[in-house]
Image (spheres, grey):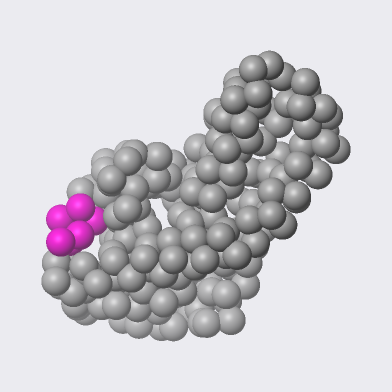
Amino acid sequence: MTAILDSLARALRDLFSLRVLWVVIWPMLVALLLWLALGITFWSTFSGWLEYGLDKIGIQVWLSELEPVWIANGIQALLHLMLFVPLVMLTALVLTALFGMPALIRVVAERDYPQLKRENGGGLVGSVWNAVIAIIVFISLWVVSLPLWLIGVGILIPFVAAAYLNQRLFRYDAIAEHATANEMAALFKSERGGWWGLGLLTGLIQFIPVLNLFGPVIAALAFIHYGLARLNRHRLLNDPKQTAA
């Protein structure tokens, strides 16, 4: 737990570095503008899909009979928002993981681990494939959870989904440049609890207003700090001659 909290503290420390601020801004801005444009352009289509889904699970009939009407409209608007916000956050997280991580890794590695050898055990193809799996599972969890919100149980699903998404999305890219393929596999297995714990903590940030705007970069930095620290420790245990600053 100490390693997780230390990684998060280091991420917050690095957040307002000039080299980091641009990575904070552009993924969230691009994601917000993208989904605003899509939402406005295809509003009727998205609404139709939502009504179709609600009708399939029997909720649309209940909403149409609900009185007064403004309550039903409010519930539908809330469901739209529940879909819009995760899509924005998901897009920002993926953009940060795929395109922002190299810059963030340089910030952390150059200062904290300048002598940690780069083995390039991962690559762009692996990163994209990893992101695809994370997205599919994340969206599936959200879709499954929508009906459960009406009975209160669904409130737990977003936290689980966010934890899964963060640990799946960022753990790969955090160590892909420095670790070998074997080291990556070993760390994913031996540090599973740590990855999930960090995923949960950084996932919770996504539900805190204002702070969630920094969520993608905080998560990225925290996973880089955690991953490189664990990799450095792994190498020292297996080969004491290896050192890092």
* Residue 180 horizontal/vertical position (percent): 47, 77
146 lies left or right of 124: right
**Magenta span dominant secondary structure:** helix
Q: Percent x, y for residue 89?
A: 46, 55
42 inside magenta stretch:
no
Residue 174 shows in this picture: no
Name the residue rendered at 24%, 72% in the picture. Answer: 22
> At 56% from the left edge and 60% from the top edge, which residue is drawn?
40
Front in this rendered view, residue 63 or 12: 63
Q: Position of residue 37 (x, y in %)?
A: 52, 66
The quadrant of the rendering that contains the N terminus is top left
Residue 15 forms part of the magenta stretch: yes
Q: Is residue 38 above or below residue 9?
A: below
Above or below, comparing residue 214 to residue 75 in the picture = below
Q: Position of residue 87 (x, y in %)?
A: 54, 55
Residue at the top extreme of this rendering: 67
What stretch of residues is rendered in magenta?
Answer: 11-16
Which residue sits at x=20%, y=53%?
12
Q: Residue at x 35, y 82 (%)?
A: 118
Closer-to-camera residue (67/99): 67
* Residue 93, image quadrant: bottom left
Quadrant into which the C terminus falls = bottom left
Q: Confirm whether residue 221 shows in the render.
A: yes
